[in-house]
Image (cartoon, helix red, strand yellow):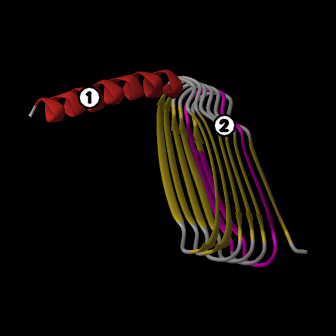
Amino acid sequence: MKTRLFIASALAAISVMGTVGAAEAQSRNRVSVAQQGYQNEIAGRQNGYRQRMVINQNGDRQYVTVIQDGARNGTTVGQTGRYNQAHVDQYGRRNDAVIGQQGRNNYGASVQTGNRNISGIAQMGRNNYAVTDQYGSNNAAGVIQVGNGQTATVRQTGSGNVTLVIQGEH
């Protein structure tokens, strides 16, 4: 019985020490993920201070969702393949989202609320779709699409508002 109590106490202490380390690391909020293959999915949420997320996926039918609340934000998503989707939502502070997609029938979307805002989506291939929504603060959005049948939607409200959409064929 004493052995079990000792083991339980030791595990509890390790758990608490592990939590303290995670809490310190959380203030920096840096995540980098690389996936390759078919039908991979990743969802990430960052709350707090110096956020940064970098995701690279190579393959078909990949899916990414990123939500960032709080301070310095920053997301970069790179996808190569077909039928991929990327969603980036950023709430508050310095924002910035970059989505790059190479291939056909991809979908990229970013929503930014408050503060500095900047969003860029670049898509190469055919029949891609890009959506950018920016609400409040300094804004700026850029969408570059190369290929046939591209669609881009940009909505901006409040403050600086700048939009650049370039569509063409290769």
Residue found at x 71% / y 38%: 140
- The answer to which of 86 and 44 lies nearer the viewer is 44
Q: Is residue 67 magenta?
A: no
Q: Which tag is nearer the camera, tag 1 or tag 2?
A: 1
Going from N to C along the chain, the mark reached first, 1 or 2, is 1
Relative height, residue 90 to residue 85 (above, below): above
Residue found at x 57% / y 26%: 28
Image mark for residue 96: 2
Relative height, residue 17 to residue 68 (above, below): above
Q: Is residue 146 magenta?
A: yes
Q: Which residue extends farthest left?
A: 1
Query: Which image quarter is the C terminus in?
Result: bottom right
Task: Give the residue number, with chain letter if any, for mark 1.
Answer: 12
Q: Residues within 10 Å of mark 2 (few under 14, many from 20)?
A: many
Residue 109: x and y in percent read: 58, 56
Residue 98: x and y in percent read: 70, 47
Residue bounds of the magenta highlight: 128-155
Image position of 116 (left or right of 92): right
Residue 99: x and y in percent read: 69, 53
Q: For the residue marked with disc 1, what is the amino acid?
A: Ala
